[in-house]
Image (spheres, rainbow, N blue to C red):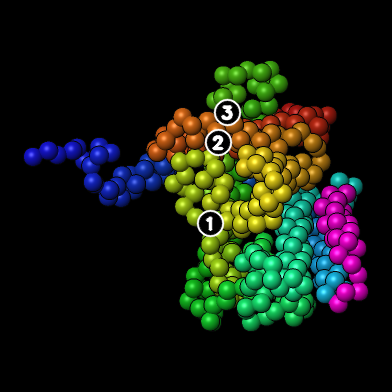
Amino acid sequence: WLQESMLSSASSFRNYRGVLNWCVVMLVLSNARLFLENLLRYGILVDPIQVVSLFLKDPYSWPAACLVIVSNVFIFVALYTERKLAMGSISEKVGLLIYIFNLTVILCFPMVVVLKLPSITPVGGAFTLGVYTILFLKLYSYKDVNRWCRVRTQVKARPSSPSASSCMQSHVSYPGNLSLRDMYYFVFAPTLCYELNFPRSESIRMGFLLRRLFEMVVFMSVRHISYLMFFQWMVPIIRSSMKPLQEMDYSRMTERLLRLAVPNHLIWLIFFYCFFHSSMNFVAELLRFGDREFYRDWWNSETITYFWQNWNIPVHKWCLRHFYKPLLRRGAGKLLSQSAVFFASAFFHEYLVSVPLRMFRLWAFMGMMAQLPLAWFVAKFLRGNYGNAAVWLSLIIGQPIAVLMYVHDYYVTHCQDDPTITEAL
């Protein structure tokens, strides 16, 4: 009878667990060899003081933490504005102006402080700006959903979105949601999209919570391993890349890029699992937050678009609900709306990188905007495994390019005149 070869795509055979285990063993062995080679060549480069200095220049001064505490002011302004709008004390136009001012200051205030205050390190600045960016997206969603509820209350016959109608059917109805407890539950909940009634689990599962806590404790160790990988593995490669970049030696630049790709990608994978799975599930379980769809199977992506839609579900849902669909309702085409979403994402990527580094080179912005033609090319010319390979290649190679560009520019901007750093490089 007719029989296909087992490794043929036409075969019904799907159990490749042994091949996967082989890939893992080969990955561990190859990286162990590279790591041992690094130790023999450069010795131990990790300095605990240097790791601490990434976060604190002065152990008695915590400017980044103070900035995070100040963010509560903007939360109170948003809640106060919504209460006044619900009572009719201010008009919708005045409320909108207050929100525009509040949201604008949320983005500009920390940026100015980070740029003007030398005691804030790049890592501390990135963390602070990340917190303020999340708060910006949350308060924008808070504004929209409460406005939808007011429209639903005033015009009951008008069809409404699921979010607006839920405020009439669920346990809490508008304006009963405008409480400090409700606001801070949303602020700490692992979501960017506001609802009057979030799905809630019946109880806290202690076993699940302790497993996530254990993973987070392990994550603390893994994070130190990530720092070790950065200082021990990536720093020598980056240092040796400065001269080829200055001389535009493309062959050596490519070789350094490929060497940098592996440790950079491993750190990114560690970050993804620890943040999107362990940390967010821990917070969700602690708050009994029911919607745990923080990511989907992005690793099976056969198109660039599928990856961006599924690797970070909270951001994707926010973009879809508060940016993409409103643009479509206003008459914008799908291509224009998708381009606008990528443009906004590119802006925030650049905002979170350039401001902490105190330099503006637009590498992150251009990298995100380059996803548009790349997405078109992959969707049009590549399918199946080829498309999936293209997605993985863009992840593994794309990020190290941006890392090299930013490190080179940071060296030229901040360190070129320092003879000790120049000698080290």
Q: CA distance from mark 3 to mark 2?
A: 26 Å
Question: Residue drawn 46% across and 52% down?
Answer: 297
For badge 1, the amino acid type reads: Tyr
Question: Residue drawn 71% across and 73% down?
Answer: 156
Question: Residue drawn 77% across and 72% down?
Answer: 154
Q: Which residues are magenta?
A: 87-112
Q: Earlier in the sequence, mark 3 or mark 2?
A: 3
Q: Nearer the viewer, residue 155 or 198?
A: 155
Instruction: Residue under label 2, please give it.
Output: 375
Q: Where residue 273 sits: x, y (%)?
A: 53, 56
Q: Nearer the viewer, residue 257 or 85?
A: 85
In which quadrant is the N terminus drawn?
top left
For badge 2, the amino acid type reads: Ala
Is 259 covered by the magenta stretch?
A: no
Instruction: Residue under label 1, please give it.
Output: 295
Q: Where residue 172 sits: x, y (%)?
A: 68, 80
In which quadrant is the C terminus drawn?
top right
Position of 258 with respect to 98 (left or right) is left
3 or 1: mark nearer the eye: 1
Asked whether disc 2 touches disc 1, contact meaning CB atoms under 8 Å apart, the reply is no
Q: Earlier in the sequence, mark 2 or mark 1?
A: 1
Instruction: Residue under label 3, please give it.
Output: 256
Q: CA distance from mark 3 to mark 1?
A: 32 Å
Assign a secondary structure to mark 1.
loop
Task: Name the mark on residue 107.
Answer: none
3 or 2: mark nearer the eye: 2
For badge 3, the amino acid type reads: Arg
Q: Nearer the viewer, residue 191 or 271?
A: 191
